[in-house]
Image (spheres, helix red, strand yellow):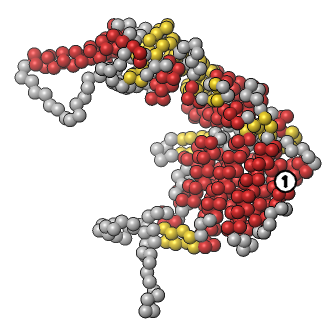
């Protein structure tokens, strides 16, 4: 106040939500995101159909894909989406679990806030519980040998169950384990030597693992050879075309001979480029850019197989398996930049198979599906399975699935809470309750009674059976580890870590300020809509997507 008048600090266009209202606003936004993906969790989870602004359709139950595709316009909701993205980057799978647990943590935190427990106490309790939970997971987990293919197959099958890859999961799990084994050197998995290609027209059971690379392209000229044994292979990142000038040019000719002279000069340029390729000793050219029609003719005349418009990722993969350098300038390269290998043509599938030297360990997983939507979902499921198997090989620890690990850790956390002083004890207990969301949702999505299921699971774990989980197909509580429902321990640890950090970040906010027009130029924009949070209507963008 100045001389009895209020001091105006914020503009009239800005909006502000404070204290309890701000916490409630943030928690509701985060829970809305979590609830959007809950129904996709588990083997009996449902799929979502996502339609973007261009009308393209994606059908999936992959948590991170759903959240990325949804049109969300809320800063708090976007923080929860980051949980899924972090989980995908660090563990490869478990994105839905991570987001659902984050939402449940905030729901239980809201109950504690209503009991006048300060957010700082809740945050500290959640942090203590998260640390203890990760220690318990490590204690419960079982070591797995990188050579134990049977257990690794179970990990892959568990990851694919409930996804588009489930129907052929046994066949796919086998080739996934073989693929990871092929790119594992001295216990380290090098995923840059593993490539995934997709093809429509056949069933997923026809998917196969191929040594080397698969290039889904055709030769640029019909008279070119279709294959090459023990070939010198050039990887080119330069167009074999007439060089375009950087500025607009105009050519004036006064008689036909001048025009012919101009065309002859262009032909000479193309001949020179082709001759440089011939002089290097290359038998095959994989070009990332275009190849002129005339250059195609000259290359075919020299008996050189050429493929154009090869994807950047494929060229990089070819570099790894052929030991070649990617050439960006035909004026500055030599035979030492060429790779060495075999190129075979499959006319039926219209593919090139490229194999490198015997000691090259690059492989390609060729996934097949009946339609584009089927093969896209298949690729998502297989990619997650590849990541979790690779993570299992690197980390060497697994746990029982089907909600077994969550119920066991929750039981141990309640015992741990007895030794925690102050109001943080209540937050640790709330954390334990949040973990039990996983078996509850698994039961709900399978059409089972979630309360009865949770009671049976708790009884089994209190009786000492730490691997008891839910068999969603029979509805029975059983040793899920023996049943083949196996998950990587690292994935569970990462899910809890990400979910806790996101929940604590949301709880620490007690004031939301949506700035008005931040520009200093008030000309034509005066009276424009508030920026920042979209007027803090917040979830407007989610309404149409959920």
The answer to whether residue 230 of the structure is visible from this angle is yes
Q: Is residue 294 above or below residue 174?
A: above
Position of 132 with respect to 517 (left or right) is right
Q: Is residue 377 visible?
A: no
* Residue at the spot of label 1: 411
Position of residue 144 in the picture relative to residue 352 (left or right): right
Residue depicted at x 55% and y 31%: 372
Pointer 1: residues within 10 angstroms few (<14), some, or many (20+)? many
Give the farthest residue toward the left. 254
Helix, strand or loop under label 1? helix
157 vs 325, nearest the viewer: 325
Residue 384 percent across, percent down from the top left:
64, 36
Marks counted in the figure total: 1
x and y percentages locating residue 400 in the rendered image: 80, 40
In the displayed orientation, state which residue is furthest to the bottom: 3
At 16% across and 20% down in the image, what residue appears? 262
Residue 300, percent across and down?
36, 10
Instruction: Write down the quadrant of residue 386 in the picture.
Output: top right
């Amino acid at each position: 106040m100045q001389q009895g008048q209020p001091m105006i600090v914020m503009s009239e266009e800005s909006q502000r939500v404070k204290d309890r209202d701000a916490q409630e606003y943030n928690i509701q936004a985060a829970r809305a995101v979590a609830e959007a993906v809950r129904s996709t969790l588990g083997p009996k989870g449902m799929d979502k159909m996502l339609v973007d602004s261009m009308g393209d359709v994606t059908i999936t139950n992959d948590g991170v894909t759903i959240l990325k595709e949804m049109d969300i316009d809320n800063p708090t909701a976007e923080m929860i989406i980051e949980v899924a993205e972090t989980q995908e980057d660090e563990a490869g799978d478990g994105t839905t679990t991570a987001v659902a647990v984050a939402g449940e943590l905030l729901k239980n935190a809201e109950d504690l806030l209503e009991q006048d427990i300060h957010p700082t106490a809740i945050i500290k309790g959640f942090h203590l519980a998260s640390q203890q939970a990760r220690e318990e997971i490590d204690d419960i987990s079982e070591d797995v040998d990188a050579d134990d293919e049977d257990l690794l197959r179970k990990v892959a099958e568990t990851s694919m169950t409930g996804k588009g890859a489930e129907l052929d999961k046994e066949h796919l799990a086998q080739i996934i384990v073989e693929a990871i084994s092929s790119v594992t050197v001295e216990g380290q998995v090098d995923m840059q030597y593993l490539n995934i290609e997709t093809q429509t027209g056949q069933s997923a059971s026809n998917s196969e693992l191929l040594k080397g690379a698969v290039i889904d392209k055709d030769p640029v000229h019909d008279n070119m050879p279709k294959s090459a044994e023990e070939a010198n292979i050039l990887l080119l990142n330069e167009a074999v075309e007439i060089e375009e000038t950087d500025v607009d040019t105009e050519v004036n000719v006064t008689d036909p001979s001048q025009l012919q002279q101009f065309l002859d000069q262009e032909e000479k340029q193309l001949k020179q480029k082709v001759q440089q390729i011939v002089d290097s000793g290359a038998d095959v050219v994989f070009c990332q850019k275009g190849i002129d029609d005339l250059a195609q003719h000259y290359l075919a005349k020299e008996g050189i197989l050429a493929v154009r418009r090869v994807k950047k990722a494929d060229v990089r993969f070819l570099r790894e398996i052929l030991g070649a350098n990617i050439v960006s300038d035909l004026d500055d390269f030599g035979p030492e930049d060429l790779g060495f290998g075999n190129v075979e043509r499959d006319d039926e599938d219209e593919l090139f198979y490229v194999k490198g030297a015997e000691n090259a360990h690059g492989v390609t997983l060729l996934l097949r599906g009946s339609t584009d939507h089927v093969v896209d979902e298949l690729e998502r499921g297989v990619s997650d399975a590849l990541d979790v198997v690779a993570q299992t090989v690197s980390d060497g620890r697994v746990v029982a699935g089907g909600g077994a690990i969550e119920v066991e850790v929750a039981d141990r956390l309640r015992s741990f809470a007895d030794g925690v002083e102050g109001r943080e004890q209540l937050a640790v207990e709330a954390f334990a309750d949040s973990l039990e969301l996983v078996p509850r949702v698994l039961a709900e999505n399978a059409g089972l009674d979630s309360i009865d299921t949770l009671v049976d699971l708790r009884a089994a774990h209190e009786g000492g059976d730490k691997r008891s989980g839910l068999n969603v197909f029979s509805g029975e509580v059983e040793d899920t580890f023996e049943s083949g429902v196996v998950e990587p321990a690292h994935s569970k640890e990462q899910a809890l870590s990400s979910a806790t950090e996101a929940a604590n970040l949301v709880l620490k906010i007690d004031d939301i300020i949506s700035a008005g027009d931040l520009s200093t130029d008030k000309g034509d924009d005066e009276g424009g809509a508030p920026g920042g949070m979209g007027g803090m209507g917040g979830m407007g963008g989610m309404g149409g997507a959920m």
